Amino acid sequence: MDATQPPEPRGEQLPAVPPYASRWKLVRDLAVFEGKLALDGLKDIVLAPLALLAAIGDLLLGGKRRGLLLTKVARLGERFEGWLSLYSIRPGGRPESADLLGDGGSDVIVDYLESQALEIHRSLKGRREKRRKEEQE
């Protein structure tokens, strides 16, 4: 193959880029992604020594139970990664049936925190507007 020729396309489609009509949506998704990255790093900090302790425990246990503790730690990390869903950006939102421990995962918490923050913002905005009206009267 000649190095000057571009490679032929393999027919693979690139994933669709979510439309960002507002800057708020882009900033929100960035904040969520950064938060998930921080949680993923925290998971690594916790699981590394836990895995070491589990392996030591497995060496001491011996017999048929050897490897049981380390396997449990690995499964715990795997479940956490599935729950965190680190690389998912949901432009269409999550299904209404999603729950915290099931298919919603960490996105349920993010949606809850976002709704609470928006509710507080609306409440404060309403209070400001009410105060302005009272001052004008």
Image (tube, rainbow, N blue to C red):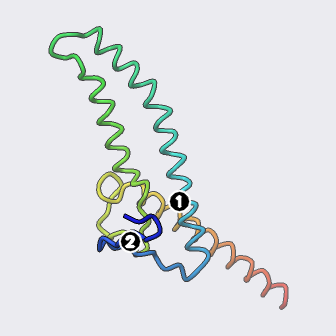
- Horizontal and vertical percent position of residue 2: 41, 66
- Horizontal and vertical percent position of residue 116: 54, 65
Mark 1 secondary-structure assignment:
helix
Query: Going by the picture, which residue comes out furthest to the right?
Result: 136
Q: Please give left or right for residue 125 compared with residue 118 in the image.
A: right
Q: Residues within 10 Å of mark 2 (few under 14, many from 20)?
A: few
Front one among 45 and 114: 45
Q: Distance of mark 1 from mark 2, alpha carbons?
A: 20 Å
Give above or below for 80 relative to 74. below
- Horizontal and vertical percent position of residue 29: 53, 66
- Horizontal and vertical percent position of residue 25: 55, 73
Query: Going by the picture, which residue comes out furthest to the left?
Result: 64
At x 17% / y 11%, what residue is drawn?
63
Tell us which disc is closer to us: 1 or 2.
2
Q: What residue is disc 2 on?
A: 15
At x 57% / y 71%, what residue is drawn?
26
Residue type of the residue flagged with mark 1 = Val
Pointer 1 with pointer 2, Cβ within 8 A:
no
Image quadrant where residue 91 sits: bottom left
Q: What residue is disc 1 on?
A: 32
Quadrant where the C terminus sits is bottom right
Q: Residues within 10 Å of mark 1 (few under 14, many from 20)?
A: some
Residue type of the residue flagged with mark 2 = Pro
Mark 2 secondary-structure assignment:
loop
Give above or below for 65 relative to 95. above
